[in-house]
Image: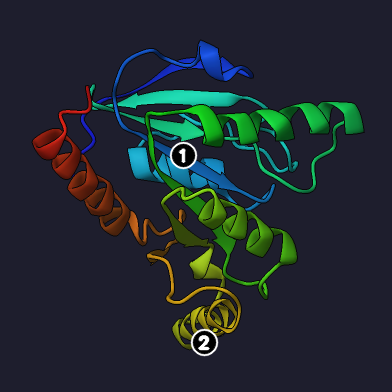
Amino acid sequence: MKINTAEFVISNSEVDKCPKERLPEYAFIGRSNVGKSSLINMLTNHKNLAKTSSKPGKTQLINHFKINSNWFLVDLPGYGYARVSKKTKAVFQQFIMDYFEQREQLVCAFVLIDIRLEAQKIDLEFMEYLGESEIPFAIIFTKSDKLGKNKVNNHVEAYKKQLLAGDWAEMPPYFVTSSLEAIGREGILEYINQINEDIFKNEGFI
């Protein structure tokens, strides 16, 4: 898939204020400071489409970006650590749940995982929530440039082993990425393109 256009549409904290267009949506989410904004900018080939920050918790709203005029990339707040008050955190954590449970246009979520770290409880719990809610998702391992190739493979295998030791019958689809080196870009975009083709061919998404 070639990204011809990528435009910011709206930010909000209420699902019913999201775009009304019946276009497929792909939500990107992960723990704060996992490199989500950098990944979105890399995927769309726009340096400043999503705001990046050295401070965790920069994204605190549901952000819609229209891609190629036929699908939405949705940038969601990070779960877990963020320098906001408990009251504020409770609010945007709730509207994350509202988005996943109410947004009919959502066709796939991408859960971002820092490949350098061992499996984190909060990530596993979030993926369990998606599975129980029957929300299709794929894993994106970020920051692979921080490790050597052998370590990348070992970390992926360790993650897969831990997932399969739990309640998962098989490893969800996954992608290894580096925003700095544009690794994984083509794979993710092709995955989205295939889903879009199936949607428009079989359902028309109306």
Labels 1 and 2: the sequence-earlier one? 1
Image-based side of 195 in relation to 172, left or right: left
Q: Residues within 10 Å of mark 2 (few under 14, many from 20)?
A: few
Quarter where residue 172 is shown: bottom left
Residue 16 rendering spot, x and y as whole percentages:
53, 14
Q: Cβ–Cβ below 8 Å for labels 1 and 2?
A: no
The quarter of the rendered structure image containing the N terminus is: top left
Q: Residues within 10 Å of mark 1 (few under 14, many from 20)?
A: many
Quarter where residue 183 is shown: bottom left
Q: Residue furthest left?
A: 201
Q: Secondary structure at mark 2?
A: helix
Identity of the residue drawn at 57% across and 61% down: 113
Residue 195 rendering spot, x and y as whole percentages:
23, 46
Three-letter code for the amino acid on which mark 1 is drawn: Ala
Residue 17 rendering spot, x and y as whole percentages:
52, 11
In this view, 95 is above or below 138: above
In this view, 65 is above or below 158: above
* Mark 1 and mark 2: Cα distance apart in space: 27 Å
Q: Secondary structure at mark 1?
A: strand
Between 53 and 95, the residue placed more toward the observer is 95
Identity of the residue drawn at 54% across and 35% down: 101
In this view, 126 is above or below 146: above
The quarter of the rendered structure image containing the C terminus is: top left
Q: Which mark is residue 27?
A: 1
Three-letter code for the amino acid on which mark 2 is drawn: Asn
In this view, 32 is above or below 131: above
The residue where tag 2 is placed is 154
Identity of the residue drawn at 66% across and 28% down: 95
Residue 192 rendering spot, x and y as whole percentages:
27, 46
